[in-house]
Image (cartoon, rainbow, N blue to C red):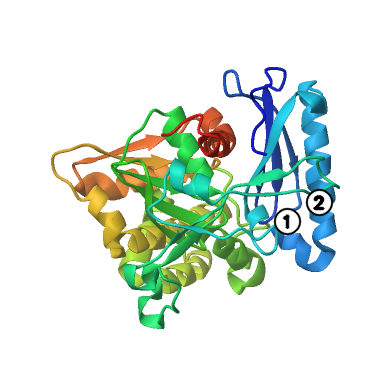
């Protein structure tokens, strides 16, 4: 069915961004791509293992209803419902196969799956596929040996976010998009504005686990989350991770607590600096990503998204790292772009499926 936007009374879409721990419903006006309402529910794909898929269906329906109420829009004015992110995995509402990279609007649109969920919406929901990075020998579906696993990757949701960022910021590749969060995503966009490759790390979840489930938590205060940015301590953690490895750098947090005059928040900055240092090491180890930034003449954008304070921390540390890379320009996304990029990107993919746009 797709988007029924031929009927001019249907001027809105609802974009569901389903994460591991949260689900957001955004009400988007097709006339100007403005977001009229956002409703978040603290339930995501991780919850379905214990609570069942019905709990996620109920959360999505509630979020959508809240967005319509907040935006003062009737269900009859909605052209379609779009879903992207972890909601499209086996733990979400529908397991949608990944599209192989390189993939832009057209390629992602070809992987769209539409399915009806009567408890959520009376017409089929448009599910946006994620993207998988595969080395050439494995694109036919054969098993990847352990020795080659580092060059493979997957994403769900970040493809819509990246496409939305490109549109909203009027960017063209090649660029590198950095999306910190529970999992850091480092995404290479090629000269045809296709997602060419990605590298993922577990930085955010690792930081939370270190703070909540290890002895180091005693040195990090009640929370492992940053309250403010201490550039000096973050850079110290960054340097320690790159010089001694992240395992040793993380243990230094304990030593800083016992042997130095530092506060818990300074040690949290050291923790996150160490994690970003490991992320940069992963970037440098992948030739598809590192080749984008290792230029000498042309200006290359490294675009940093995510939510604060991580966005600011990544800006600080990537700028510190890029001092030796004269061709790199660090661009930090405005909050309003971060907030609506995934909804814009998902809408662009749906419109491409209908043949209404092609790039």
Examine the rendered structure and indicate whether residue 206 appears above or below residue 80: below
Quadrant of the image containing the C terminus: top left
Tag on residue 289? none
Residue 216 horizontal/vertical position (percent): 58, 69
Q: Badges 1 and 2: C-beta atoms under 8 Å apart? A: yes
- Residue 357: percent from left, percent from top: 47, 30
Image quarter where the N terminus lies is top right
Which mark is drawn over residue 57? 2
Residue, disc 1:
93
Question: Which of these two is toward me, 267 or 105?
Answer: 105
| Vertical comparison of 180 with 344: above or below | below
Taking depth in this image into account, of 120 and 222 the one nearest to the observer is: 120
Cα distance, mark 1 to mark 2?
Answer: 7 Å
In the image, farthest residue toward the left: 297
Q: Name above or below for residue 79 compared with residue 303.
A: above
Q: Position of residue 174 (x, y in %)?
A: 29, 43
User: Tag 2: Cα neighbours inside 10 Å, few (<14), some, or many (≥20)?
Assistant: some
């Amino acid at each position: 069915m797709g988007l029924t936007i031929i009927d001019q009374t249907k001027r809105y879409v609802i974009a569901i961004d389903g994460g591991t721990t949260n689900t957001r419903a955004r009400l988007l006006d097709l006339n100007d791509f403005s977001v009229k309402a956002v409703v978040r529910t603290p339930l995501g794909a991780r919850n379905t293992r214990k609570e069942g898929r019905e709990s996620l269906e109920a959360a999505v329906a509630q979020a959508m209803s809240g967005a319509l109420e907040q935006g003062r829009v009737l269900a009859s004015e909605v052209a379609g419902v779009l879903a992207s992110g972890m909601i499209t995995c086996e733990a979400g509402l529908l397991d949608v196969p990944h599209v192989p990279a390189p993939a832009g609007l057209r390629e992602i649109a070809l992987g769209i799956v539409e399915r009806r969920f009567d408890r959520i919406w009376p017409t089929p929901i448009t599910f946006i596929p994620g993207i998988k990075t595969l080395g050439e020998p494995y694109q036919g579906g054969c098993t990847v040996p352990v020795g080659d696993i580092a060059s493979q990757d997957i994403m769900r949701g970040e493809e819509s976010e990246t496409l939305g960022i490109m549109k909203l910021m009027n960017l063209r590749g090649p660029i590198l998009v950095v999306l910190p969060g529970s999992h850091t995503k480092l995404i290479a966009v090629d000269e045809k504005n296709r997602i060419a490759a990605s590298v993922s790390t577990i930085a955010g979840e690792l930081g939370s686990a270190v703070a909540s489930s290890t002895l180091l938590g005693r040195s990090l205060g009640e929370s492992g989350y940053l309250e403010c940015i201490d550039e000096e301590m973050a850079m110290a953690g960054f340097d320690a991770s790159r010089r001694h490895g992240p395992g040793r750098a993380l243990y230094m947090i304990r030593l800083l607590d016992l042997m130095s005059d530092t506060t818990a928040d300074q040690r949290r900055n050291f923790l996150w600096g160490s994690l970003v240092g490991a992320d940069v090491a992963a970037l440098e180890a992948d030739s598809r990503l590192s080749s984008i930034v290792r230029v000498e003449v042309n200006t290359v954008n490294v675009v940093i998204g995510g939510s604060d304070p991580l966005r600011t921390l990544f800006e600080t540390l990537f700028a510190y790292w890029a001092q030796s890379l004269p061709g790199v320009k660090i661009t930090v996304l405005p909050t309003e772009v971060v907030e609506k990029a995934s909804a814009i990107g998902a809408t662009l993919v749906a419109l491409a499926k209908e043949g209404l746009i092609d790039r």
